[in-house]
Amino acid sequence: MFILFFLVWVIFNGQLTAEIAIFGVVIAGAMYWFLCKFFNYSPRYDLFFLRKAPLLIKYLITLIMEILKANLVVFKMIYSAKYELEPAVVHFKTNLRSTFARVLLANSITLTPGTITVALTEDEYTVHCLDKELAEGISSSVFVKLLEKIEED
């Protein structure tokens, strides 16, 4: 996070001189200290994200691909005169342990066209689907499998 703060400082300044770099290190250090002191942030989080970066990048790519596929499916559903939509509300549970993973799954479901996470209570999700076909396999989706891999130690 410190490096991210420093990079943002340099980007906003538009140039890199010795003075800007020194001042940026001080500002980034102060922001990082503030984050750790008042927001219960820890360098452990930085290490976690650094270790899990390849899986998180894979998750992001998978999310983008699923969004594109769902766009096509929803487009066909909406513009097909023969197809009659049957909305459904689905409840399911996951074995995800961390709040980070559960919230990421809920947001991924909502970002995917045709589905909206209505509620998340502990490990139980309530999802509204544009059509019951979209609800099939939601509890064991590719998102859940990747998040379970990310949670593995």
Image (cartoon, helix red, strand yellow):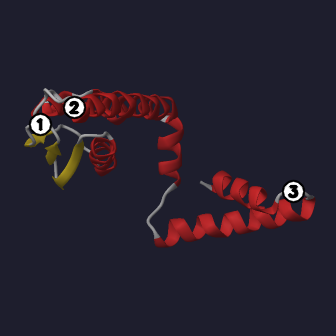
Sequence order check: which comes first, mark 2 or mark 1?
A: 2
Sequence order check: which comes first, mark 2 or mark 3?
A: 3
* Residue nearest the viewer, comparing 51 with 58: 58
x then y, percent, for residue 72: 33, 28
At 10% from the left and 33% from the top, the residue drawn is 84
Q: Is residue 5 left or right of residue 23?
A: left
Q: Quadrant of residue 101?
A: top left
Q: Is residue 132 above or below residue 116?
A: above
Q: Is residue 114 above or below residue 148?
A: below
What kind of element bears circle 1?
loop
Q: Is residue 60 left or right of residue 4?
A: left
At 43% from the left and 33% from the top, the residue drawn is 64
Q: CA distance from mark 2 to mark 1?
A: 7 Å
Q: Which residue is outermost to the front?
A: 81
Crowding at label 1, few (<14), some or many (≥20) Cα neighbours within 10 Å? some
Residue 77, numbered label = 2
x then y, percent, for residue 6: 71, 57
For mark 1, what is the residue?
Answer: 85
Q: Is residue 88 visible?
A: yes
Q: Is residue 46 above or below residue 69?
A: below
For mark 3, what is the residue?
Answer: 15
Amino acid type for the residue under numbered disc 1: Leu
Q: Quadrant of residue 85?
A: top left
Q: Is residue 86 left or right of residue 76?
A: left
x then y, percent, for residue 116: 23, 48
* Residue nearest the viewer, comparing 94 with 38: 94
Q: Quadrant of the N terminus?
A: bottom right
Amino acid type for the residue under numbered disc 3: Gln
Q: CA distance from mark 2 to mark 3?
A: 50 Å
Amino acid type for the residue under numbered disc 2: Met
What kind of element bears circle 3?
loop
Q: CA distance from mark 1 to mark 3?
A: 55 Å
